[in-house]
Amino acid sequence: MRWTVHGRRAIYESPWVSLDLVDVEQPDGQRYEQHVVRMARPVAATVITRDDTVLLMWRHRHVTDTWGWEIPSGRIEEGETPEHAAAREAEEETGWRPGPLRLLVASQPSNGSTNAANADRTAPRRRVTTRRTVRRYGRRTAPG
C-alpha cells in the first residue's frame, strides 16, 4: 500500500542539500509532517587496479569526527553522465584516472528520510561504478 503526499514545504535549500517538511498520510490514515533531506545526485567509483587492489582513501570526516577508508565519491554535475562524474571524482580525489566505467550498483541509502536523487524519481540514485583499468596522472586535486 502506498503513502499519500499531500504537500511539501521547503525549510532550507542549496545546490547540495535541501530540507523539507512533507505532509504525508500512511495507508492506515495516520497523517503527519515528516522531515525529508534531499541531496544532490551522488556518485562513487570503485576502482580496481590490474593487480586486484581496490583504490581507497584514508580520510577524516569532521561531521562524525572519525577516520575511515572511502572510495572516491561526489556529485553528478549538471549535464554530466554518472560514468563521467565517477571518473572525474576518482581523478580529482586520488590522481588516478580510471578507464571506461560500468555500473556496479545503484541504491537509495536511507530512503526513509533522504532522497539522493533530489526529488526526481527518474534520476539515477547513488551510483557506484567499477573499472579495472586505472592510470596515475598526478596528485589529487580535491581536498581531503
Image (cartoon, rainbow, N blue to C red):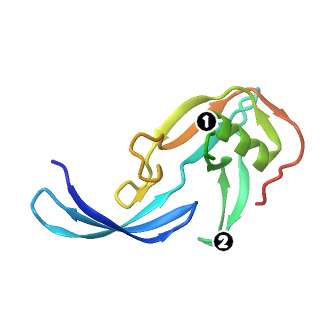
Residue 1: horizontal and vertical position, in percent? 15, 47
What amino acid is at disc 1?
A: Thr
Which residue is labeled 1 in the image? 81
Instruction: Say which quadrant the C terminus sits in.
Output: bottom right
Q: Determine the image quadrant of residue 48.
A: top right
Please identify the residue farthest to the right as the structure is shown: 138
Judged from the image, the secondary structure of the residue bearing numbered disc 2 is loop
**Amino acid tagged 2:** His
- Viewed as shown, does residue 86 lie left or right of 142? left
Q: Is residue 64 visible?
A: yes
Q: Eyeballing the image, is 115 above or below 106?
A: below
Quadrant of the rendered structure where residue 91 is?
top right
Q: Is residue 55 visible?
A: no
Gap between marks 2 and 1 measured at Cα: 29 Å
**Picture coordinates of residue 64 (x, y %)?**
59, 71
What residue lies at 38% left-to-right and 54% top-to-bottom?
Answer: 111
Residue 51: x and y, percent?
A: 76, 28
Q: Quadrant of residue 134?
A: top right
Residue placed most toward the observer, 12 or 66: 12
Q: Is residue 52 left or right of residue 26?
A: right
Instruction: Say whether disc 2 or disc 1 marks the residue closer to the N-terminus.
Output: 2
Residue at the image point whose x is 76% and y is 26% from the top: 50
Q: Is residue 74 above or below residue 52?
A: below
Please tell me how crowded label 1 is: few (under 14), some (14-19), or many (20+) other residues with Cα within 10 Å: few
Circle 2 sits on which residue? 62
Q: Residue at x 61, y 35 (%)?
A: 81
| Local secondary structure at mark 1 | loop
Relative height, residue 16 to residue 65 (above, below): above
Q: Give the total number of marks visible in the rendering.
A: 2
Looking at the rendered image, the disc whose residue lies closer to the viewer, 2 or 1, is 1
Q: Nearer the viewer, residue 53 or 114?
A: 114
Badges 2 and 1: C-beta atoms under 8 Å apart?
no
